[in-house]
Amino acid sequence: MAIRHFLTLLDLTSEEIVALIDRATELKARLRDGVIDEPLKNRTLALVFEKSSTRTRVSFEAAMVQFGGATLFLSPRDTQLGRGEPIEDTARVLSRMVDVVAIRTFEHEKIERFAAYSGVPVINALTDRHHPCQLLADMQTFFEHRGSIAGRTVAWVGDGNNMCHSYIDAARQLEFRLRVASPEGYEPDPQLVAAGSGWVEVMRDPREAVAGAHLVVTDVWASMGQESEQAQRLERFSAYQVNRDLMRLAAPDALFMHCLPAHRGEEVTEDVLLGPQSVVWDEAENRLHAQKALLELLLRR
């Protein structure tokens, strides 16, 4: 069987994404019922992380424990990658010792190079260009609360970053309308927008984007590695805060999501983050269940 990687949402078909969401919801219910599932007994996941993490690391490690497997966490200071070993060599060696590798790094090109030389599945645990595992959890959360997202309208407010890029992929795969409101100079990659033509619209006014939306999503204004731009971004994004007034423009039953961590008082106000429309804690928990379903899919024999 050919090795399958998960570097973007486009590595799965639309049908596979829906089936994975259904399976994640099933696994969530089974866990709460006390059912023990160990389809990955004696299998090993390597986490190669150049960026810090809470939800991604804990959800992957917990997933492997619950599935009967094991995890090795490797930071740059723990491996020869941090001392200049070529990515290709690390991929060749590591994939002879473990069953699957999840990588959290900066440049997306690095994970593509690793996957090209890996003998086992590689999962994108976040790059500067895409964050597909988070989208699996987001979509699971929407399905749980509102049913299918097909035909719905989603508003992305803020930076056209890696999360925004994965929302563009999700709009293509799951056929929802995505309105992206970003300040000038911070729009998503135009090539990805063009690829999502018919599903994605980029605009300036966050009020226009949110009007009638069924889901409103945002992210921090300065991501990891952009700390030096913090002051400039605070100024440029000041009109893109998701607050109560903005949420009133959305559909009455609209949900609010944020991949966390959130900077209260910047991209979102505390009353929205902790309010009745927010599903951020379900969204965070679903990282565990969606990734269990993903691991099961990629390691299916």
Image (cartoon, grey):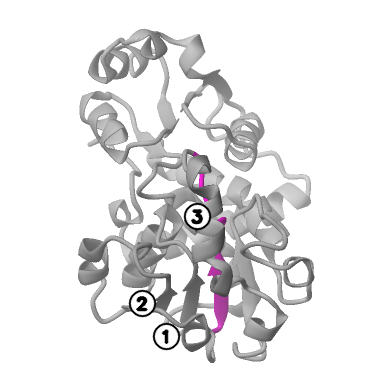
Q: Earlier in the sequence, mark 1 or mark 2?
A: 1
Q: Earlier in the sequence, mark 1 or mark 3?
A: 1
Residue 123: quadrant of the picture: top left
Query: Left or right: 200 with respect to 69?
Result: left
Query: Left or right: 180 with respect to 288?
Result: left
Q: Position of residue 275 (x, y in %)?
A: 78, 73
From mark 1 to mark 2, how far is it between C-alphas? 6 Å
Query: Left or right: 222 with respect to 127?
Result: right
Tag in front: 1 or 3: 3
Mark 3: which secondary structure?
helix
Q: Which residues are magenta?
A: 213-224
From mark 3 to mark 2, how far is it between C-alphas? 35 Å
Residue 31's label in the rendered image is none
Residue 175's label in the rendered image is 2
Q: List the residue tagged with mark 1.
A: 151
Mark 1: which secondary structure?
loop
